[in-house]
Image: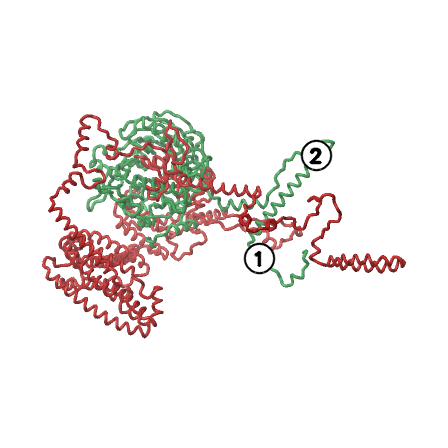
Amino acid sequence: MESAKVLTKKERRQLRQQGRVPHKLKELSKATQVLKADRKKDNRTRQPWNRPKNADDGDPFPGPVPHSHSQLDKYDWGEGLDVSSLRPGPHQAHARRRERLTEQALHEMATGEMLLQEEDGFLEADEGEDTADISQSELRDAVDITSATKQFELRLRQFGPYCANYTRNGRQLVLGGSLGHVAALDWVTKQLMCEVSVGESVHDVKWLHNENMFAVAQKEWVFVYDSQGTELHCLKTLHRALKLEFLPYHFLLTCCTERGLLNWLDVSTGRIVTQTHTRMGRLGVMCQNPANAVLCLGHTRGVVSMWTPSVPEPVAKILCHPHPVQAVSVDHTGTYLATGSVDRTVKVWDLRTYGCLQSYRLGAGASHLQWSQKHLLAAAVGNTVEVYRDCITGTPDRPYLRHKMAGSVSGLQFCPYEDVLGCGHRNGFTSMLVPGAGQANFDAYESNPYQTKKQRREAEVKQLLEKRRLGPPIGIDTTGIRSHIAISIHRRIGVRSSIQPELITLDPVALGQVDTATLQEKVQAKEKLLFVKTPKIDYTPRKKTKGRSKDGKMAARKKGVRGLEQRKYIKEAKKASKALIEAEKGPAKAATATKKAVLDRFKKKSL
Amino acid sequence: MDGGLELDETDAVGGVMFDDASGDEEVDQAPAASHDRLLQNINRLDSKRAGRSIVQRSEAAPEISEFHMAAAEDAGVNVHDLLTSLGDQARHAGLRREVNRAKHQRKLPAPLEKPQALKVQRKAGYEKTTKEVTRWENVVKQRRGAEHLSFPLEKPDIGLETSAERTAAFVPQTPLEQEIAALLGGSTAVVPAGQILSEAERQALAAMSLDEALERRKQLAKHRALLTYQEAKHRRQNKIKSRKYRRVLKKERLKQHLKEFEQLKICDPEAALAKLREMEKQRVEERMSQRHKNTGKWARLQAIKRKYDPAAREALAENLRIGREKTQKTAQSAEDGSSDEEEEEGEEGPVASAAVAPTDPSNPWMAADSAADSVADTYGRYDKFWTEQEAAKRRLREAERREEDAQEDREESEDEDRPAPRVTAADIAAEPDSDADPEPLESEEPPRPAGKKGKALKRKADAQTEGKKKTKKLKKGAKKAQDIDGIFDTYEKVITKKTKKAAKLSKDGDEPSAKKQKKQKKKGAAKKAKKSGSDEDEPPSGDEAEKMDVSAERRATMEELEGLVGDKAAPQPSAEELVAETEADPAPGPGSGPGAPARSAPELDPAKFMAVETRRLRSLRPGGDDAGGDDALDDADDARMTMAEAFADDDVVAEFREEKESTIDADKPKDIDLALPGWGDWGGKNIQMSAKKRRRLLFKAPKGPQRKDHHLGHVILSEKRNEALRAHQPSELPHYVSGSVAAFEASIRAPIGRTWLPARAHEQLTQPAVSIRAGTVIKPMDESALLAGRRARGSSGGGRMGARRRPK
């Protein structure tokens, strides 16, 4: 394969039209080499250091801050608009200005990186040593006291195995023992928020949009509790749920059930958005794609299927293994999918191309898989948790870290913004240290680990407002220049995933794409044209005098007019369908029909 | 005529009938009547008379009145007739003249019909209004294209006042001010506005003794006389038409210039440089004003004339000579420079002269001899004569010049103040590896492969521009240096060196990269070999080997990439490269060869894609032992593996394939079958519809676009449209993108929300088009807006329209 081949814009567009590049790739390939090569060309215009320097203002570093391509690529929104292709006039001027401002914004964002002061790092072993051999206790002894407190073990032998879930900011933890023990705690301060026994089996626990509420999938139904352990709701529509997921931007609680149903429940309104019968058997393996809010299910036929609430069939189905899929996980960028099967293999897939990047064989089938924010992959093999580094591009032959639990692992999650991996197992819960797992810098507007009560409340209101702000864009006038903004807002609000449930799509930027009618629809429209029925003609004759409006006369007149109209309509329809048929037959036949033979001149003219 | 003849006939017939029917008594009357008729008919025959009816007054009337008179044929009374009737011509000459004048006077045109008049009026009105409205066009355009308009547009003028403006209005008021003003006003030392000398100065000049004044006067007179002499001399000289004289004069002037230049070179290098430039400019201008040697209209004319006209011959010869002189000059100077250099700095070598050698084949102007040859060819026998003559002349001239040069050189060598080396220390400092061995020029380089040619060319061009830049930089350094004589030479040398160096660099850059690639290939091969060696225990099938090749290569490229990037973000770009690869090669599966057809049937074999080489990790077994590495363990592992495979559901793959097939079928647009058995045909049992008819009534659905998953055997992507999403998608395009979906999508690609952008960018991007200051009156536009627009355009250099800037 020649990787250095640079495709032109046109070529790529052609490829895309032919479907040779998956559609999704279009947006996600922003940071590819191809673009890099393109960018290298227009270096001169792009780089601020090429701008004239103002020598007399005494600034030793005049002009804006220069940025590297890799920095800019991180924030890039794709190829720009070729302004010269627009019609000249005020719109072109506006578009040009917008392009300039967009480019400026890109640079500003790259400049903002300066503020990200935290650095991440990984554990490095001495020569002859292996990081996998470093035990958690050794790690705990080596790290600072604050970090050391993050490594702990909860021995809960009575109600295990345990599943666990961290809040989005990584501050709180909820534990669910399968024998009915549910507990929520601030795991950093080890402060217990609540502890209840639900008295029936617990399959899964999930925090909702903040630490005030969590959902528990119990034996029959899904229950919602608040942080005090008070039961708020019993969701009987979610029957016999096995796994729960919460889509934070959409406020959707989703669950897959024993009976093969997939449910999306809007927790802001309490209504079921969609209930889909997957017809794929018991659904015990589920994860969400955080980038586009699509749900991924693992099935016994080796297939991973992806679901959105608006399409009643899987939007994508990937045959990943020839054996049942036991574990799936999608990383936070929505790019990589890890699947684990009973055949002891773990595969890493690129969701942009649906290609398999890596395939690994473990000691046993991985029962749980989990990506960290820095692309470490944790795999639970029996009672052991192994964490792999560089498993997307590199080819590790041994784990980065390994830890043996007190029992077989039943739940796995990396704590966001922390170097911590939480594992629920047969005999409790273990929080282990995994250096380099979490994102070092957090976006406080997105999720703030140090959120105060007031901030939490405000964030909740904002979240709800963003979800509720938009209805269908009926009023958007696409002909005006300012509609750009309207559409852009509309689209960008849901860039991670669209806010309204129907906007959840495999391609997260589909909302910004123009809806061109599909071929199928065109064909259908034509088909309809062939079998048109005459429309009903509602005609009431005028009242006339001198006995001309007797019932019989009226009826006759009515019939006459109706017949006239109908005949007219049928004539037109016939003409149209004839034209259609002729068009289908093609011009070649028409040509043969008009071709005259030599002796045709002796034919009668009237014929 | 016809009528007359017919009449005659009928009359004749009638006559005969009369004769037959009536008696003899009637025969007497007949001749008179028929005679009258005959006369009438004859009258009618006369065409001239036929149009006119002669009217005779037949009855008498008691009073003669115009009303009783029959109208005459041409009733109009001619003025001329009236005049003639006046008689006595001399007395009425004035009247006659007046009448004549009146006759020749132009008549006013008849007024137009009303609709036409209105039409003309409307047209004029339209044109006028168009003109008026067009004046506003720019203003409107400007406003529409403006980034932002904040109303009211008229801003208070807050320009800075100049000191002159401020002092103009100053009136001294306080006593102190008045005193100072009086002092200033009364002083004779103050220079009044618009004058050169103050009063005091003028007085000082005036105050001289008589002798001094006389002497001064004499001096002035002498000076004036000299001036007039000189003037007369110049006038005389200007009138001289001799070519030879002019030539000599020019040469003298040149010498003078050179002398001045030599002097300046020592005392004021900057001025010398300017002088040099001026001289060069003069030469260039002269050169530019020179006619084309033999292609111009004039030259061709002369060529025709030359056979008969000695003057034309001479003119042509002169023209050619001048041309050669002009072109030879550069060559000569270059030669001079190089020879000088050779004399003074042997180790530098003849580098500069190579670039501008007079025998440069690429420059036709430099080929003096060949040019002469060509001329000789065209001019034939005669020209042979004058070429010889010219050659002799040229030899003479060259000898002269050489002599001159030698003289100059001698002078220069005598001049001891002049620093000896042409290439100064500054030059050497600017060019650290100037002592690098001279390399052949780019033209002598071995030809590059075709693919790299463009790049190489570009690089060359870049190098040249770079060289130019460097020379610019160097200029400053050279200014400081005392030596200016060799400036041009030095520059040329520097440029050639730079280009050479750049060429060499680019060559080098190419070579190592090629080497690298080779190396990489080797590496990849080695890796392959290694891989196959390590995997000996489970020999791969043909397919697998191929697949491994691919993966090995990929890994090699990854390594390469990592080596290139070498930063923390290593995993990201390498993955991106993968994407790029897949983009380049649409079927990323190991099974797809490079020679696969562009558009093929959808891929249906999932097994192809699932088979990625599995890597065994040193993972823990549930028992607690390490899985990887140990061979003995591996065997056991494989045994277990086979057990697992035994239970593996092979149907999984086949099932998936079937599912995909059925999905493809379901998504295909269906054919329309309009066939109705028995319709227009015999019906009943066992009666088949004719295949032809069936075919005729079947409308094939057109082939749909390729499926998104057509190249992925292991993936089914739903082609179903998201109807819920469609309601939110834009379905129309704004007019200005002229139907381009891609352009529209690109235009809305970037976010503008606060969540995704820094505050400033957000504010800029969402700035409203118009803002209105509350509580202010916004007046409608008037004519002043036109002027404002013009002013704005004038200030912005006529480039960008619109964009009224807000004051900061």
Where's the N terminus of chain B, which quadrant?
bottom right
* Measured Cα–Cα span from mark 2 to mark 1: 51 Å
In the rendered image, which residue does mark 2 sit on? A554
A95 horizontally vs B441: left or right: right
Q: Which mark is residue B611?
A: none
* Circle 2/circle 1 CB separation < 8 Å: no
Provide residue A106's location: percent of width, then percent of height. Answer: 32, 41
Q: Residue at x 71, y 52 (%)?
A: B53
Whether residue A200 sits left or right of residue B564 in the image: it is right
Whether A30 is drawn above or below B275: the answer is above
Asked whether, in this view, residue B770 is left or right of residue B62, the answer is left
Name the foreground residue: A360 vs B664. Answer: B664
**x then y, percent, for residue B695:** 58, 54
- Residue A446 on image: x %, y %: 33, 34
In the rendered structure, which amino acid carries the disc numbered 2? Met
* Residue located 35% across and 45% down the image: A30
Q: Is residue A342 visible?
A: no
Chain coloured green? A
Q: Nearer the viewer, residue A212 or B93?
A: B93
Q: Hue of chain B?
A: red
Disc 1 chain ID: A
* Residue B330 in the image, given as x and y percentages of width and height: 23, 62
* Residue A190 visible at all: yes
Q: Dot 2 lies on which element?
A: helix
Q: Secondary structure at mark 1?
A: helix
Q: Which kind of residue does numbered mark 1 sit on?
A: Ala
The quarter of the displayed image where residue A209 is located:
top left
Kindly identify which residue carries mark 1.
Answer: A591
Classify residue B764 by image quadrant.
top left
Quadrant of the rendering where the C terminus of chain B is positioned = top left
Tell me what residue is drawn at x 29 percent, y 59 percent: B288
Badge 2: residue crowd in 10 Å (few <14, some 14–19, many ≥20): some
